Image (cartoon, grey):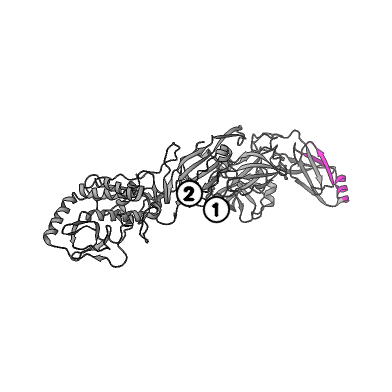
Amino acid sequence: MATLLLTTLGTAIGGPLGGAIGGLIGNQIDARVFGPKGREGPRLKDLTISTSSYGQPIPRQFGRMRVAGSVIWSTDLIESKQKQKGRKGQPSTTVYSYSASFAIALSSTPVDRLGRIWADGNLLRGAQEDLKVGGTMRFYRGFGDDPVDPLIAAAKGPLAPAFRDCAYVVFENLELGDYGNRIPAMSFEIFADGGDETVSLARLVPAAVLPPSEPPLAQTRGFADEGGALASTLAAIDQVIPLVCASGHEGLTLATRALPEGEVMTLPPQLARDDRERDENRVRQRAGVPARTPAALRYYDEERDYQTGVQRASGTREAGRELMIDLPATLTAGGARQLANDSANRARWQHETVTWRIGELDPRLTPGSIVRQPDAPGYWLLRSWEWLDRGIALELERLAPSGGAPRASDPGQNLPPTDLPIPATTLAAFEVPPEAGANPAQPLIFAAASATNSAWRGAALYAVQGTALVDLGKTGSQRAVTGVLEAPLGPSPALLFEPGAEAIVALVAADLDLAETDRDGLTAGANRMLIGGELVQFLHAAPLGAGRWKLAGLLRGRGGTEPAAAIGHGAGAPAILIDDSFVPLDPVLVPPLATSRVAALSTGDTAPVIAPLANAGLSRRPLCPVHPRVDSAADGTRTYRWTRRARGQYRWEDSVEVPLVEEREAYLAGFGPVDAPHAVWQVDTPALALTAAERAALTAAHGPGPLWARQVGTFDRSPALLLANLT
């Protein structure tokens, strides 16, 4: 009855807001007259997903919240396909990828700023405001002068809506490969209307009459008003944070219940005892059954990424089903525990009421005032007053004494998704020695892309042709294990396993790993690392911290790279682990020339990352001949001989001829510097015969010098093998 009456009265005095406050006052009176009953306020929601239903209300958001939002505009999925070359002899495949553009409304009230964004539980946008996948994002704060989004305007034309007075986000060409090629379930961290502070009634009910120094709602860091009757929202708050609703000469006022600043007014003594006893009996009849003590509070836990949390009041466990309060607010665990304790403490005291009869009403006494009795301890709330024929009856409710100091509380374990900054791409392009069975005519050109952390999602590769970039496909999200030599690696004859040899390598990322192997693993080709132009195998790998590794037990000059091993490498030489993370490059677009360049571009790159082709021609260059020897005849003729090797044929089987691999067998022998010889001979067998007179003529004309031989391959010449020094 009081609810209906005061709702009507409040509407007449203060309009819709007055009706809401009047209804709240009526609820409080009815609860005291007819006994306590359950109140239905805004329900606490678990983390929901974005919806796109017509008629779905867009809630008002206050403070810091995590919201799902509503999809208000979207395009169809955009399909793109790309043919990618297979890795290490695998067939090429056609890869389809999808993206979409869409807009999601977040709040019907302005939003100061946008924080993190979750998609399918993973971070789509981190705390550093970086998108983890490809695409662009635009954020509109929800003011009346927000412009029309250009993408929506292009799609809808002159009738494109601006969605003013609604905070929303627009994603343009958001890549969906990480989300099953569909728009993912998204939620947004928003900071609305003073989101770095606590929420106040002035923001929640801007049309209400509030005290000049109205404090914020205790412990409340954010609040979601999902719509519906304002009275139900205020009633939900009143369960945890008591509100005082009163009507007076200023109209309907609303405030949180708190002790006034300064001295609390003490009531004058009561009138005759008989009148007091009659009033006290009437109050006991109205009091009804004491309210159940709320045992727990459900809320949004700020310390657990706004997931639903529960804090229980101390000492409230009872038999049967416990009374739990839902508050759609963002709180800390300690703040929620304090509110739960305060609610339970108030419930234990709120049934203690007194009617205080006085003869004259002080104008400072109004419903909602907090007073003291002259002959009783504690503070009392003046709920209402009534004019009687013999004085004025004040209805007082005992305020709960302080519950003591706040108690610490644990929000529980949180497993937040990794929030790493999107790193820039590191890129290397190179040729590698051929493996057994490889096509001898096919250049083995690869790209190795990596980054400093696992947030890197891959990059697009391009061949640099003048000022143009020609598409080469994508790297995929697997990072290559790359780095540099931290200390020089000396020369090696590359003949035997070197158990005492060591190399210090600094990888590009601390979370990249190297593994150990055994000698059987070395024989099978494990742990191969390209250092400069040399292929090295290592037996042991020991981490030194911060991405630094010590490689020990080296097998140098593998795959015919003995010439590079004989020179050694300085600090800073590139080091790349040979594994399946490499991307094969088309030799038509990236020819095996030292002038070829490759570019990479990823989400974390502000400009294309360009790398020159290293070891150009290595995969099709014949191997250096070996085993130089000389036969001398009685007439002084010397026959210089050598043994050929073949690309990809590194296992020398007994009694098996090494295959030629090249189109024909041919060698170039020379005397003097390799780059500018004094004399050359072309032969088709691995032998060169020089008489004593020929040798004497060479030294007489040019002086002492080296005699060498190179194999002439289909595409290149091998490094030179020293046969002898002619003197």
Residue drawn at x 64%, y 34% as measured from the top left: 437
**What percent of the width, then of the height, locates residue 65?**
42, 49
Check disc 1 and give the amino acid type.
Gly
Check disc 2 and give the amino acid type.
Arg
Quarter residue 683 falls in: top right
Q: Which residues are magenta?
A: 678-701
In depth, the one of 326 and 256 nearer the eye is 256
Tag 2 secondary structure: strand
Image mark for residue 444? none
Mark 2, Cα crowd under 10 Å, few <14 / some 14-19 / many 20+, is: many
User: CA separation, marks 2 and 1?
Assistant: 29 Å
**What percent of the width, then of the height, locates residue 377?**
21, 64
Quarter residue 275 falls in: bottom left
Q: Is residue 574 left or right of residue 336?
A: right
Image mark for residue 547? 1
Relative height, residue 26 to residue 684 (above, below): below
Task: Of the two numbered discs 2 and 1 on the same chain, state the one appearing first in sequence.
Answer: 2
Tag 1 secondary structure: loop
Residue drawn at x 28%, y 50% as measured from the top left: 25
